[in-house]
Image (spheres, rainbow, N blue to C red):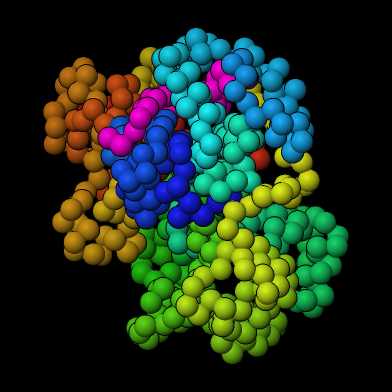
């Protein structure tokens, strides 16, 4: 996030898109509701499904899945045409505006309506409301990123925010709500195929040499493979061994039939997890690890806040903390890792990660600090880009709309989109072992609009078969107007109805994320 969670409450306008905030990020959702209820903030929801937060919204725009670039360009078209953009901000703090202006010229509200289904007058109202607010913030999540155009979607939101001068101000910015409690921290520490900690590129000689010196080894200059690319490499025989930590791939990855065949071809498949997941059951070796309450260390949350984690109980049985397992394996394989405790690892992090350098265990003993925090006198950074962007000037990127990889046709006439629900979490590794969660949401459901249900002879509670070009799954129907006509929704929490057997593995060409949020499907009563 460019800004802080608590700042949401003080925004004049909140634009939330691709995020079912109250169900998937309840704390952030609480601040959104508080902003509307207590401070009179205006809320714009742009989302295919009627999520619970809609009842708080001033405007609810319902786009077709996979058409985000079009409506964002459309909003910019209105803002520029009506002279509502932040002219001085654009002139002094950004570059590339003219190229974007030329591209969005054709994205008139009427043109956008034909692509997205959003009525032209609603698009105009949203554009005016966002542009004229003194403080306006954008919230988004995986409904924006999990597309083959995910990178384009995010850059388009950045274009919109810069156009209106909303970046580098309190209660403004572009704020991704990350999917788990330490996704931000994992990325910060280099759990990406092309960077070292602090996003230092492996292909840059000076960055690589810095880590070679710190670790005393020779490091590759070539970026590695992403998760989906790993499975393809295994399928083709280019990858011989895979070490999977805390990832239930056989529920969370797309096109699971293909993944299963790929994993079968590995010479060695190791899974390190807190439970025997569907993926762990497929492994040659399982290493039992400790859960969050059984280890010490830090988590870095979605607002870049580094927080202490303290062990509450001992790990059960043979379970060990992740860092101990990794250090032990490394030592046995010839590279000694002589960490004695989590604080030792943290000391190394501070040495090689400039944005974390000023964060000590003592400073975060009571309250977390937000990076960048370059030295021990620094108070942490509440919001980014106050005076300048990292590169100096903010860069506008002209982006054209590209349709999803699959759209409905005669054989597969409906959209399928996927997501999460309040009472289950990701692949259910923990929540499906919690009685209370299972009582509230015990099984997978297929959300179907009443008109679609009537058309295909499906009644509420009946088992329905959902098929795509990659296979089929079955689950009970939930006939509801939450999903728009022409679109069905499934969650991915349940192994009994693995929706990712049928999702589309089409990848974003830049970040390689799969297009989980839209593919073509058909439904029938089972």
- Percent across and percent down for residue 439 are 16, 56
Closer-to-camera residue (221/236): 221
- Percent across and percent down for residue 426 are 37, 53
Closer-to-camera residue (307/253): 307
Up the image or down, 63 lies above or below 230; here it is: above
Locate residue 276: give its quadrant: bottom left
Up the image or down, 80 lies above or below 137; here it is: above
Residue 207 located left or right of residue 157:
right
Say which residue appears at 46% left-offset and 39% top-offset.
12
- Percent across and percent down for residue 109 are 51, 13
Was residue 495 drawn as part of the magenta stretch in this picture? Answer: no
Which residue is outermost to the top? Answer: 110
Closer-to-camera residue (278/112): 112
Locate residue 98: give its quadrant: top right
Residue 192 located left or right of residue 257:
right
- Percent across and percent down for residue 38 are 32, 46
Say which residue appears at 68% left-offset and 85% top-offset.
336
Was residue 73 drawn as part of the magenta stretch in this picture? Answer: yes
Q: What stretch is highlighted in magenta?
A: 55-80
Residue 285 seen anywhere in this rendered image of the structure:
no
Residue 476 seen anywhere in this rendered image of the structure:
yes
In this rendering, the count of numbered labels is 0
Say which residue appears at 59% left-offset and 16% top-offset.
82
Up the image or down, 242 lies above or below 153; here it is: below
In the picture, which quadrant includes the C terminus? Answer: top left
Residue 425 located left or right of residue 373:
left
Up the image or down, 254 lies above or below 61; here it is: below
Say which residue appears at 37% left-offset and 83% top-offset.
312
């Amino acid at each position: 996030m460019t800004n802080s969670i608590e700042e949401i409450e003080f925004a004049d306008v909140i634009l939330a898109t691709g995020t079912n905030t109250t169900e998937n990020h309840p704390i952030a959702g609480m601040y959104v509701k508080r902003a509307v209820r207590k401070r009179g903030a205006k809320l714009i929801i742009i989302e295919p499904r009627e999520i619970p937060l809609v009842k708080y919204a001033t405007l609810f725009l319902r786009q077709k899945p996979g058409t985000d670039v079009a409506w964002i360009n459309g909003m910019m078209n209105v803002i520029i045409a009506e002279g509502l953009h932040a002219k001085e901000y654009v002139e002094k703090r950004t570059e590339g505006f003219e190229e974007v202006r030329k591209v969005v010229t054709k994205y008139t509200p009427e043109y956008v309506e034909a692509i997205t289904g959003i009525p032209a007058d609603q698009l105009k109202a949203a554009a005016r409301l966002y542009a004229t607010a003194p403080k306006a913030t954008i919230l988004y999540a995986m409904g924006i990123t999990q597309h083959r155009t995910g990178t384009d979607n995010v850059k388009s939101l950045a274009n919109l925010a810069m156009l209106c001068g909303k970046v580098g101000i309190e209660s403004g910015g572009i704020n991704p709500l990350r999917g788990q409690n330490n996704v931000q921290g994992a990325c910060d520490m280099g759990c990406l195929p092309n960077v070292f900690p602090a996003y230092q590129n492996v292909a840059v000689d000076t960055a690589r040499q810095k880590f070679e010196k710190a670790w005393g080894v020779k490091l590759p200059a070539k970026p590695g493979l992403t998760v989906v690319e790993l499975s393809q490499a295994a399928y083709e025989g280019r990858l011989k061994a895979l070490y999977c930590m805390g990832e239930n791939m056989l529920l969370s990855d797309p096109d699971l039939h293909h993944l299963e065949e790929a994993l079968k071809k590995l010479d060695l498949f190791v899974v390190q997890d807190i439970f025997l997941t569907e993926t762990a059951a497929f492994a040659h070796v399982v290493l039992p690890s400790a859960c969050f309450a059984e280890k010490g260390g830090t988590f870095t949350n979605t607002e870049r806040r580094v927080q202490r984690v303290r062990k509450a109980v001992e790990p059960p049985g043979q379970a060990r903390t992740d860092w101990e397992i990794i250090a032990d394996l490394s030592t046995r394989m010839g590279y000694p890792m002589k960490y004695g405790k989590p604080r030792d690892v943290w000391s190394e992090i501070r040495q090689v990660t400039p944005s974390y350098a000023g964060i000590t265990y003592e400073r975060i003993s009571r309250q977390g600090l937000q990076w960048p925090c370059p030295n021990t006198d620094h108070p942490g950074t509440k919001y980014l880009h106050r005076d300048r962007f990292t590169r100096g000037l903010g860069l506008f990127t002209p982006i054209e709309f590209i349709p999803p990889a699959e759209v409905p046709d005669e054989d597969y006439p409906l959209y399928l989109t996927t997501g999460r629900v309040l009472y289950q979490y990701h692949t259910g590794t923990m929540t499906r072992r919690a009685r209370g969660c299972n009582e509230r949401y015990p099984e997978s459901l297929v959300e179907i609009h009443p008109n679609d249900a009537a058309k295909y002879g499906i009644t509420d509670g009946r088992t329905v078969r959902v098929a795509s070009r990659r296979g089929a799954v079955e689950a009970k129907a939930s006939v509801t107007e939450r999903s728009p006509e022409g679109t069905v929704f499934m969650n991915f929490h349940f192994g009994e109805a693995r929706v990712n057997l049928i999702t589309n593995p089409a990848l974003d060409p830049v970040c390689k994320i799969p297009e989980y949020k839209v593919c073509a499907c058909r439904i029938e009563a089972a």
